[in-house]
Image (tube, helix red, strand yellow):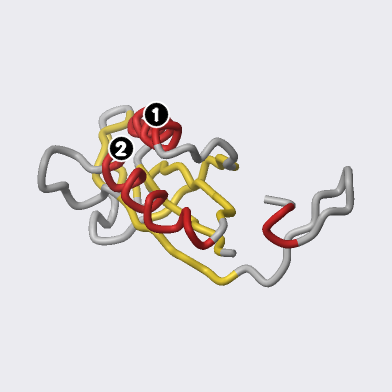
């Protein structure tokens, strides 16, 4: 079992959800987050003054999958989250973490059965 954490642009959320549905991944958690990487923010003008905006709005997805769904999930996120054919800085990142245990609260099922 793995926990996949993906940070994507908010505008790409619907495309990523559609791509995940196509590979039969239906369960995910979505959170609004802020951060920056290579983009390092941008400058905006507010009431005539330039303001440096360091934290950019992003969306974080958390998806728990069994091992056979790891690669299809990664490919779906890349397909839906990439800007253009080659992608651009700011498209996001995907992290794959080992997951020791999963427990379904309702039934008490554990492990891959609970996902």
* Quarter of the figure with residue 46: top left
Residue at the location (55% across, 40% down)?
30
Residue 111 in which image quadrant: bottom right
Q: Mark 2–mark 1 contact, CB under 8 Å?
A: yes
Q: Where 74 falls versus 80 (above or below)? A: below
Q: Along the line of sight, which residue is nearer the eye, 65 or 32?
A: 65
Percent position of residue 75, x then y: 31, 50
Q: Position of residue 52 (x, y in %)?
A: 30, 48
For disc 1, the marked residue is 18
Residue 53 position within the rendered picture, expressed as x and y whole percent measured from the top left: 34, 47
Q: Which residue is mark 2?
A: 80
The structure residue drawn at horizontal position 79% and vertical position 57%, both measured from the top left corner, is 103
Q: Is residue 1 left or right of residue 35?
A: right
Q: Residue at x 72, y 67 (%)?
A: 101
Q: Earlier in the sequence, mark 2 or mark 1?
A: 1
Q: SS of the residue at dot 2?
A: helix
């Amino acid at each position: 079992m793995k926990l996949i954490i993906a940070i994507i642009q908010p505008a790409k959320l619907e495309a990523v959800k559609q791509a995940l549905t196509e590979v039969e991944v239906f369960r995910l958690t979505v959170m609004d987050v802020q951060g920056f990487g290579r983009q390092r923010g941008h400058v905006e003008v507010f009431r005539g003054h330039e303001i440096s905006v360091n934290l950019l709005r992003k969306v974080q997805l958390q998806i728990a999958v069994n091992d056979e769904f790891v690669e299809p999930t990664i490919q779906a996120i890349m397909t839906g989250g990439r800007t253009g054919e080659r992608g651009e800085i700011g498209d996001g990142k995907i992290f794959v973490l080992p997951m020791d245990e999963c427990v379904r609260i309702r039934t008490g099922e554990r492990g891959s059965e609970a996902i």
